[in-house]
Image (cartoon, rainbow, N blue to C red):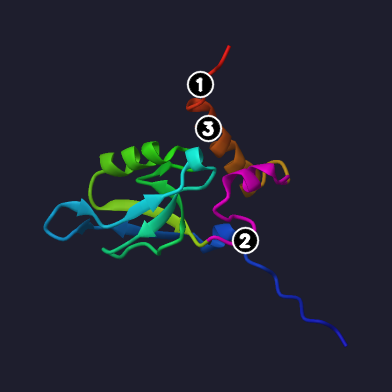
Amino acid sequence: MSKATVKKLHWRAKVQESFVPLGGGSGELGVAIGGGADYGEFPFVTAAPGGGATVGDVILEIGGTPVLGMTLGDVRGVLNSCPHPIRIKTVSPGSTLCKDLRLYLSKCFTPGSMDSQLQQVIRENLYLRAVPCE
């Protein structure tokens, strides 16, 4: 008997792109975010009353700007500075790309792979916000 092997899709194949509308007549954004590098997490969607995003999804880009490795304040700054409607790229968390930023950075990936490149983007965003201590 031969076993049928099921090839797991890479998280990159599950990336969703959507537009975040303004919420109601108040002019507020139709999405709320949490996490951020200051909490050791990827930024993620905490509420999406306007639709366009799924609660719990990891946010990869906002308006074409990679936000992985940014603090929550910086991610909110990018979100608030984008023209409307805001284009957002998200992915559902899984075994490789979960909400834990430290866990993802501790993994070893093949040099040049999509995951290795993503780790580099995260590190660059982290280093831009690092304060040297003497």
Q: In the figure, 3 relative to 123: above or below?
A: below
Asked if the residue at tag 3 contacts the one at tag 2, i.e. Cβ–Cβ closer than 8 Å, the answer is no
Q: Position of residue 131 (x, y in %)?
A: 50, 21
Residue at numbered disc 2:
10
The numbered dot on residue 126 is 3
Task: Name the residue rendered at 73%, 45% in the picture.
Answer: 108
- Circle 3: residue type: Leu
Of the numbered discs 1 and 3, the one sitting upstream in the chain is 3
Of the numbered discs 1 and 2, the one sitting upstream in the chain is 2
Please, which residue is most extreme toward the bottom here?
1
Per the model, the C-alpha gap separating discs 1 and 2 is 34 Å
Residue at numbered disc 1:
131
Per the model, the C-alpha gap separating discs 2 and 3 is 24 Å
Closer to the observer: label 1 or label 3? 1
Q: Position of residue 55 (x, y in %)?
A: 41, 63
Asked if the residue at tag 2 contacts the one at tag 1, i.e. Cβ–Cβ closer than 8 Å, the answer is no
